Image (cartoon, rainbow, N blue to C red):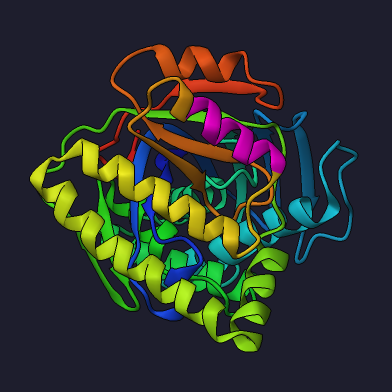
Amino acid sequence: MVTASAPGKVYLFGEHAVVYGEPAVPCAIERRARVTVEERDEGLRVHLDDLTLDGFTIEYSGDATGRPDVNVSESLVEAGVGYINEAVEQARDAADAPDAGFEISVESSIPLGAGIGSSAAVVVGVIKAATAELGIEIDAREVAERAYRVEHTVQDGEASRADTFCSAMGGAVRVEGDDCRRIEGVDTLPFVIGYDGGAGDTGALVAGVRQLRSEYDFAADTVEAVGDIVREGERALQAGDLSELGELMDFNHGLLSALGVSSRSLDGMVWAARDAGALGAKLTGAGGNGCVVALDETDATETALSYTPGCENAFRAALDTEGVRIE
């Protein structure tokens, strides 16, 4: 039996634009998915306990045919099962054990579908734990590569490497196409996260931006402008200039809102954070519903968000400089 854990993430800058080859800067946060894997004779038995779900168990030999009775959209549950299926296939491939069976338990403190990397953390954790259970040691970069293949498959080719690379490697990272690397020298960032209790439909939101970009030149220009913000933001990050980082986060949120991926609840939390004195605030992830991230070294933003209508939970989540690990 092997347990591995991997962190979630927030985007300082660059979600959606990263799909079109623009750079993005995601940062790992100290909220983790923990995956325990034990080899069994055949098939898969999966136990999932996420803070947004009642715990449930699925047992099957190949693709899952049942659906658990939980208060979460069918698309999210189907995607979750798909991520685990594909992660298991990657582990089997790495170990050259195509028929290996597994008992898999997932415990996550990362809200499902909320834009802070739940699926990536689970995929990374499954691959690391399952390969270790089969006696194979693979490093974080190989885990990241295999986890990207999982998301690319499940998301019908729309995935970027950002989420999985960040979860596998930890810290602040820069992703531009296939060029992925850690941003060295970034040890701490004062993140505050607000969560509206919902989940965005990543596929639909990505498709919506794609349609806008194909129909309107100014939408394509907006995506490129997000890339410009990322490049400025990377310089501010390396210089340790939190004030400029926050200002650029505000710009980034405005552009994402213009692309149609924000919502009333996300905008409300962003403005509550800014009014409380946050250096900057923006949605993180695909949008629609889910989370916002703010920069604030004080307690003011967390307090303000906890009283904001539409915000179900507010919490600090420090930068996690460590990626996937065996527990």
Inspect this view and state whether residue 102 appears.
Answer: yes
- Counting from the top left corner in percent of width and height, residue 97 is at 50, 70
Q: Is residue 97 above or below residue 201?
A: below
* Boundaries of the magenta span: 264-273
Residue 137 found in image quarter? bottom left
Q: Nearer the viewer, residue 223 or 139?
A: 223
- Kindly identify the residue that appears in the image at 63 percent across and 33 percent down: 268
Quarter occupied by the C terminus: top left
- Residue 197: x and y, percent? 70, 32
Residue 119 lies within the magenta run: no
Rendered view: 211 above or below 70: below
- Residue 271 part of the magenta segment: yes
- Would residue 238 appear left or right of 147 to someone viewing this image? left
- Magenta span: chief secondary structure: helix
Q: Nearer the viewer, residue 107 or 255?
A: 255
Look at 78% across and 28% down and name the residue there: 54
The structure residue drawn at horizontal position 50% and vertical position 47%, both measured from the top left corner, is 284
Residue in the foreground of this view, choosing between 220 and 326: 220
Q: Is residue 43 visible?
A: no
In the rendered image, the vertical position of residue 7 relative to residue 300, given as above or below: below
**What is the tally of numbered marks visible in this picture?**
0
Q: Is residue 79 left or right of residue 245?
A: right
Name the spot of residue 171 as percent of width and height, x first.
25, 45
Image check: 174 left or right of 282?
Answer: left
Q: Residue at x 71, y 27 (%)?
A: 310
Q: Position of residue 163 (x, y in %)?
A: 43, 57
Q: Quadrant of residue 319?
A: top left
